[in-house]
Amino acid sequence: IDIEALSGKDAERCKQIAERKFTVGEQTAVASAADPVDEFVRLWTQKESLCKLSGEGLSGLKAADTQNLPNGTHILTQHIEIDGERYYFSLSYTQ
């Protein structure tokens, strides 16, 4: 599970982090998004939840590919609002 707020994020900083920690396909998704911060946070929560599921922690962040999930792995992602603050919540699980 991972949850992350959208507030306080800078689009250029998000793109820089994506260049270091995201796969090429994920980087492209952030760079081409109408709202790069929104797309970055959505993917970031998915990647962190995958890393937690695998037990690798953040060391596995670059290899965690949200666009090519391991067989039997799923991600549930929700855009939520709590007290006026926007968040993404992602849950990775296997069946």
Image (cartoon, grey):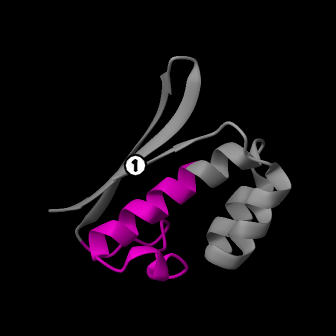
Instruction: Name the residue rendered at 70%, 78% in the picture.
Output: 20
The quadrant holding residue 38 is top right
Instruction: Name the residue rendered at 63%, 39% in the picture.
Output: 6
- The residue beneath circle 1 is 90
Q: Position of residue 51 (x, y in %)?
A: 38, 71
In the image shown, does 32 or 48 lie closer to the viewer? 48
Instruction: Tell whether position 48 is magenta.
Output: yes
Q: Position of residue 27 (x, y in %)?
A: 70, 68
Instruction: Name the residue rendered at 74%, 58% in the picture.
Output: 14
Q: Position of residue 24 (x, y in %)?
A: 67, 76
Badge 1 element: strand
Local crowd size for mark 1, using a 10 Å CA cut-off: few (<14), some (14–19), many (≥20): many
Left or right, 42 with reference to 72: right
Left or right, 2 with reference to 67: left
* Outermost residue, left side: 95
In the image shown, does 45 or 67 lie closer to the viewer? 45
Q: Position of residue 82 (x, y in %)?
A: 48, 22
In the image shown, does 6 or 72 lie closer to the viewer? 6
Which range of residues does the magenta coloring cover? 42-71
